[in-house]
Image (cartoon, grey):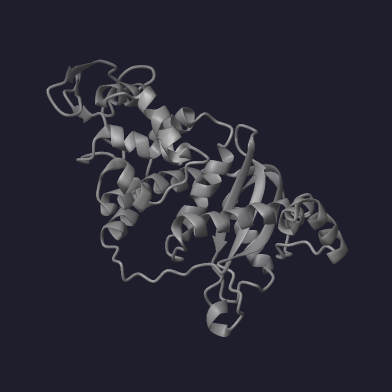
Amino acid sequence: MVLQAFIDQFEQKFMNEESCIAAVENWKWPDGFRCPHCPSREAYRIANRRLPLFECVRCGAQTSLTSGTMMHKTSTPLRKWLLAMYLVSCDKAALNAKKLSGVLEVSYKTAWRMLHLIRVAISESDSGQLLQGKIEAKHEVFMRQLMPTDDNLSKERSVIIAKGRNSEGATYFKIKRIDRNVQSRTALLAEEKKDFQDRYCDAISSDLQLNVRSQQIRKISASMLNKKKTVNGNGNAYQQQVQRPFYPLSIIASEAFQWINDQFHGIGPKYAQLYLDEFCFRLNRKLDDPLTSMSWLIKRMSDYSTTAAEWLSEAQTKTSSEVFFKQAS
């Protein structure tokens, strides 16, 4: 029901393909057309195509509306692309490829590819945003296993969740995987802390404080839990309530891991970072209107690097035989 409400909101804003074309043109060139090959600001509009083509008056170069974006040369209608991005931008409308394929009436492969490329745009943009100001960070264990056998422990992955400020001064979160040669439950080494700081923090305007403790649940007495249970019968809710003021970053990390489990039923280490970046995107833009976040995504999708093309190549060769690890819950 929540998902359908967001779909209805989108359809009220974008009633047809033409309204989507106009919106993308405005987002791509908010100050009017700019030729990517010369300084010209004027172009002939060739409209006898599915998507308009712009021919520069000065140099004659032709530019598609979707050129330079991950939507370029796609056969999927623009309206379906925008709906996918709109839903990713809605904090309460998390969806996987199976759900998206039903919403858009496209194949599972097409839906997976679209979500993958949107996540690539999110991840690429996040990589260029360094944390500033006073930065709090915490070491956590992703894909934590209930039975700590040697085989299970090898499936666990270390992450660092950090909170600081972005270049605009707003609160900004990152959750980054840490590649290690030791078990994930081992305390971080000094060089691992330094590597995180060098890669994700502004060296000039940041102050990193990293707490290496990795416990996710603060111990509280049985009497406290029992007292709360007599009120509403929910000891777990009280445990979270008591825990939050003491380990807020651990709570957020736990919510990210649970979100990945609930929505995607476990993912492989190969793509884990993309999903963690998507969670942070939703968290960082939680207070924004979905339309604002969607326009932000449109602009970022024109800035993807060759890394995105490599990930797309991997996505096209993905098979059902890929091994997935599910975090114990």
Number of marks: 0
Q: Residue furthest right?
A: 223
Q: Is residue 266 above or below residue 30?
A: below
Q: Is residue 129 in view?
A: no
- Residue 279 rendering spot, x and y as whole percentages: 53, 48
Q: Is residue 290 above or below residue 172?
A: above
- Residue 108 rendering spot, x and y as whole percentages: 28, 53
Q: Residue furthest left?
A: 48
Quadrant in the picture for the C terminus: bottom right
Q: Residue at x 20, y 40 (%)?
A: 73
In depth, the one of 120 and 33 nearer the eye is: 120
Q: Is residue 252 above or below residue 169?
A: below
Q: With 225 as the anchor, is 73 left or right in this view?
A: left
Q: With 290 as the anchor, is 170 left or right in this view?
A: right
Q: Residue furthest bottom?
A: 150
Q: With 62 as the anchor, is 132 left or right in this view?
A: right
Q: Residue at x 52, y 29 (%)?
A: 289
Q: Residue at x 25, y 50 (%)?
A: 107
Quadrant in the picture for residue 216: bottom right
Q: Residue at x 60, y 79 (%)?
A: 147
- Residue 224 rendering spot, x and y as whole percentages: 86, 59
- Residue 231 rendering spot, x and y as whole percentages: 81, 51
Quadrant in the picture for residue 6: top left
Q: Is residue 196 in view?
A: yes
Q: Is residue 128 above or below residue 44?
A: below
In depth, the one of 171 and 288 nearer the eye is: 288
